[in-house]
Image (spheres, helix red, strand yellow):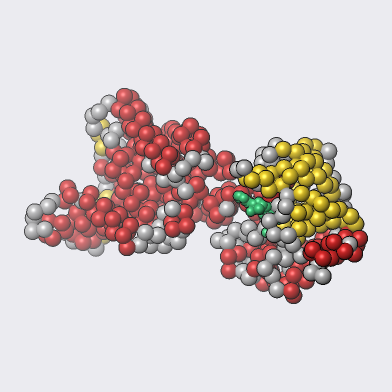
């Protein structure tokens, strides 16, 4: 088996998930200059809701059950995303930047604890209802699930790009991100646009949550923290506030992490094993912040920060 | 059409506009002139609800609008071309124009109005798909005016459309402003360039340190020795 190609494939799968989550960070940042650190918890809640819907309805075929679980997860996540903005961030719209940041951490903790109360502290195994086929590519293996993850993530990203580029709502979102008072003059209700941004980002988070729990066959009330941090890293890597940047950053981070995990043993002479794969994300984050704080294709961090 | 009574605007403790009253009748073009920092922009911003007046009343078509939510103004028929143009730099010219028509849903008419704006400003048509940020200052001013027209306003508020532009460009833009006014648009024109503004307007108000100190027909203001001395460089 070709380790290099295998790790690239695994990296792209992981990276697609990071990209979906990173889009949520970057859209909110682009519109209101805020880093919604509670976003990772929304992903976790998406994973939990999807997993428990699937568990609750055994016997249904996967082709019905998975979309149903996804819709339930999306509805719950969108509601939570909407509520987070209304309750936690809107009252702080004119406050100094530190206030919403601290609030975001508070919201994270609340959501984590709520999830723990509802679903307990245990790891939950993802029911084995997903297709388990394997396919050969260039001497490596890709599972049917991995193909589904990449394709669905690709469709979501394509759809979002069309929404932002081509629709009235997308234009209003871009106008708001460029100049809120002028957007208002045009008749844009800024509050609605901000709500829409949170709701769309949360829908993507729900999809990512289902994907990540299916990919690792596990869900846990604490899973949103690390995932959120990595997706945030991906958004910064691509250039926060920039949609294409979040997608590129997500894929890149996934691949870097996978390759790192594949070769870390060789690189350190066996001193560190693949369970150290998380350190790569943080090397990337520190590296980007030092050498290219505006990210790979970002331009606006300096003017906002 | 527009009746402003005892409007005051303050930034923190600083009163930028003090008890200003003026009116604009249907179909009129009215100039509001004054030196740097006189409070013209602050007055317009209060009208357009970009900031909230400290006190005073703004009646538009018989309705009090000084507490209206800012995004509701455009559907009432009020459009502002802000100081410094305020185009969306990372959106194309067409997209900027579509933002101007954001409050409208009559798609065929929006397409027709885009063509109308292009006929007023052929320069914009040539660059239709270009990002607004790549345009020259004059072209951006054209775009800002075109974008305002896209909402089919009844009252057009213009804040220093001549600012920072070459004389030839100013001339071209004022030709369009005059044309739009001749077609029946009500216009409130804010300008530091008093001569230019008074030449195209019917009436004028002179603003000094936050207060309106003089008002008359435009021709009479142009002939007024005080105005000539203070604003026409004589
Ligand atoms: N955001 C602000 N904060 C504090 N003071 C302000 C602000 N904007 C304007 N001012 C002050 O209010 C006064 C009026 O300014 P305003 O911009 O309304 O004048 P103006 O007549 O439009 O001037 P100009 O011809 O230079 O555009 C000035 O003294 C200015 O310094
Ligand atoms: Mg001004």
Q: Quadrant for residue A302, please give it.
A: bottom left
Between B13 and A298, which is closer to the camera in this rendering?
A: B13
Q: Quadrant for residue A47, please give it.
A: top left
Between B228 and A81, which is closer to the camera in this rendering?
A: B228
Position of residue A21 measured from the top left corner of the image (x, y, whole percent): 38, 46
Between B16 and B150, which is closer to the camera in this rendering?
A: B16
Position of residue B158 measured from the top left corner of the image (x, y, whole percent): 74, 57
Q: Quadrant for residue A136, please give it.
A: bottom left
- Up-down relation of residue A112 to residue B223 (above or below): above
Label count reads 0
**Where the N terminus of chain B falls, by quadrant?**
top right
Position of residue A176 measured from the top left corner of the image (x, y, whole percent): 56, 50
Residue sitting at x 90%, y 64%? B223
| Left or right: A57, with B31 as reference point | left
| Left or right: A183, with B22 as reference point | left
Q: Residue furthest bottom?
A: B168
């Amino acid at each position: 088996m070709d380790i290099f190609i295998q790790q690239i494939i695994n990296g792209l799968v992981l990276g697609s998930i990071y990209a979906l989550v990173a889009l949520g960070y970057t859209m909110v940042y682009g519109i209101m200059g805020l880093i919604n650190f509670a976003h990772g918890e929304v992903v976790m809640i998406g994973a939990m809701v999807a997993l428990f819907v699937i568990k609750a309805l055994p016997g249904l075929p996967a082709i019905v059950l998975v979309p149903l679980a996804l819709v339930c997860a999306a509805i719950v996540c969108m509601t939570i995303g909407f509520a987070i903005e209304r309750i936690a961030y809107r009252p702080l719209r004119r406050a100094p930047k530190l206030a919403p940041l601290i609030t975001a951490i508070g919201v994270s903790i609340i959501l984590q604890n709520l999830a723990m109360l509802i679903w307990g502290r245990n790891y939950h195994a993802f029911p084995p209802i997903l297709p388990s086929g394997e396919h050969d590519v260039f001497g490596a293996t890709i599972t049917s699930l991995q193909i589904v993850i990449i394709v669905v993530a690709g469709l979501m990203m394509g759809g979002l790009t069309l929404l932002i580029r081509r629709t009235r709502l997308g234009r209003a979102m871009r106008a708001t991100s460029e100049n809120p008072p002028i957007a208002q003059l045009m008749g844009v209700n800024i509050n609605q646009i901000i709500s829409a941004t949170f709701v769309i980002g949360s829908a993507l988070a729900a999809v990512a949550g289902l994907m990540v729990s299916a990919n690792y066959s596990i869900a846990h009330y604490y899973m949103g923290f690390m995932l959120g941090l990595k997706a945030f890293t991906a958004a910064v890597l691509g250039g926060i506030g920039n949609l294409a940047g979040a997608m590129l950053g997500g894929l890149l981070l996934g691949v870097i992490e996978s390759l790192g995990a594949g070769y870390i043993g060789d690189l350190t002479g066996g001193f560190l094993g693949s369970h150290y794969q998380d350190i790569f994300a943080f090397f990337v984050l520190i590296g980007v912040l030092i050498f290219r704080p505006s990210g790979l294709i970002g331009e606006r961090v300096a003017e906002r920060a | 059409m527009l009746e402003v009574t005892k409007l005051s605007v303050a930034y923190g403790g600083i009163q930028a506009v003090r008890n200003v009253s003026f009116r604009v009748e249907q179909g009129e073009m009215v100039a509001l002139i004054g030196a740097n920092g006189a409070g013209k922009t602050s007055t317009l911003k209060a009208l357009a609800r970009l900031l909230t007046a400290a006190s005073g009343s703004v009646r538009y078509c018989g309705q009090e609008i000084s507490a209206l939510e800012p995004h509701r103004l455009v559907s009432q028929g009020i459009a502002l071309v802000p100081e410094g143009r305020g185009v969306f730099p990372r959106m194309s010219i067409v997209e900027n124009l579509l933002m101007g028509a954001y409050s409208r849903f009559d798609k065929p008419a929006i397409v027709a109005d885009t063509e109308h704006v292009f006929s007023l400003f052929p320069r914009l048509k040539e660059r239709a798909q270009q990002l607004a940020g790549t345009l020259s200052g004059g072209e951006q001013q054209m775009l800002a005016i075109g974008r305002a027209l896209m909402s089919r306003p009844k009252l057009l508020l213009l804040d220093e459309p001549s600012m920072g532009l070459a004389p030839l460009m100013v001339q071209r833009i004022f030709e369009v402003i005059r044309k739009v006014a001749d077609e029946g648009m009500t216009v409130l024109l804010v300008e530091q360039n008093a001569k230019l503004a008074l030449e195209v307007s019917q009436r004028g108000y002179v603003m000094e340190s936050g207060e309106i100190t003089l008002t008359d027909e435009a021709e009479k203001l142009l002939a007024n020795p005080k105005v000539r001395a203070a604003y026409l460089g004589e």
